[in-house]
Amino acid sequence: MLFVAGGTSGVIFSIIPLAQAARDAGHEVVMAGPEDVMPVITSAGLAGVAVTARKMLDTLLYDDGSRRPIPTDLHERYIFNGRCFGRYATWCLDGLLEFAGRWRPDMVVGGTLVFAAPLVARHAGVPYVKQAVDMGEPRTIDLAAAAELGPCLERLGYHEMPRPDLFVDVCPPSLREADAPPAELMSYLPYATKGRIERWMYTKDDRPRLLVSAGSRISRDRDFEVLSGLVAKVAALDVELLIAAPPSVAEALSPLPSNARAGWVPLDVVAPTCDLVLSHAGGTTVLGNMHYGVPQVLIPYLPYALGFTRRLADYGAAKMVRPEDDSPENVAEACREVLEDPSYRKRARDIAAEMAGLPGPARVLGALERLHRAPAT
């Protein structure tokens, strides 16, 4: 099985559990991706093959190195994002085709928005499985990516993007869109890099514990102001404040409030102790905390996150604050509301129970194996 990863660690985390299940069942598994995410793949015990030296963030630049302007209109932003994902797929495609031609996979599994995966599967003449990495993106992104890939489609002799032979969705049924495509549903299992845990991670004091996160891609050069802004907005709350951040980012956040701690936060250890999570509404951040039944306050700074943020808020397991309304007063008030109203915790636990009742990766693997054994049509 050839798993094709996206260009950042967050989306890779989502497809690792299924890849590990396939490996543990005795299948030959390789995960392809860009050079800069190979450590994430190999640290999960998976064989990795680099298919491009370029980085996902390079899609935001013109060939001369100048930065592409990011549209402010929501629809235009979706098109911009789709073009970026399509551009990135073109950079990965030749490396994928070369590797697949030599290794000869029997199946290709690609995460959502990994648009090179269906092309290499079609070229190799093997089934293509698409796995969701969050709770869904606007379909305009897919259309824009296909437009960007037009020359590649023409070169390969395809008239349209190949469709998946199987779609694996990690969105729980209660939060799926009404017109969502048929899918093999799978329980979302959070994955993150591991390390030594300390006592404070699995114990808490008498105050509510609030975790602040801006995702796994945060750095001093990227989205730092998002994380620092979130921290500043809730610094005055009477809570135990945990801030998820790489060491260099945590250092840059100093000085911290007396009630705060910043650094590496293992979600699987810390989340069960949390009363609330405040985040930028990144897909894997939201799903991971849903898995542990933690209520959330979400500010969807990324436009693609608006749809599933609204659905989770309508369900009652989260409170949404629109980016244009993210004043310190509004964010702090939203946090107080979620902490004081037990209905948020109940609904968050309801959705966690629903997720836990879905088949895990080992069971869903059976559907992939049946697809491989099915006679070609």
Image (spheres, grey):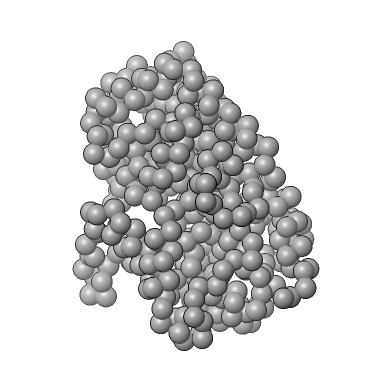
Indicate the quadrant where residue 45 lies: bottom right
Which residue is nearer to you in this view: 309 or 223? Answer: 309
Q: Residue furthest top?
A: 206
Q: Is residue 254 above or below residue 57?
A: above
Q: Which residue sits at x=75%, y=56%?
A: 366
Q: Position of residue 237 (x, y in %)?
A: 32, 20
Q: Which residue sits at x=59%, y=77%?
A: 122
Res 273 visible? no
Image-based side of 366 in relation to 155, left or right:
right
Which residue is nearer to you in this view: 368 or 158? Answer: 158
Image-based side of 77 in relation to 197, left or right:
left
Q: Which residue sits at x=55%, y=72%?
A: 162
Q: Position of residue 283 (x, y in %)?
A: 46, 46
Q: How many marks?
A: 0
Which residue is nearer to you in this view: 131 or 39? Answer: 131
Q: Residue furthest front?
A: 179
Q: Which quarter of the image is occupied by the C terminus? A: bottom right
Q: Position of residue 307 (x, y in %)?
A: 41, 45
Image-based side of 286 in relation to 323, left or right:
right
Q: Is residue 104 above or below residue 331?
A: below
Which residue is nearer to you in this view: 286 or 34? Answer: 286
Res 226 visible? yes
Q: Which quarter of the image is occupied by the N terminus? A: bottom right
Q: Which residue sits at x=62%, y=68%?
A: 128
Indicate the quadrant where residue 71 lies: bottom left
Q: Position of residue 11 (x, y in %)?
A: 49, 54
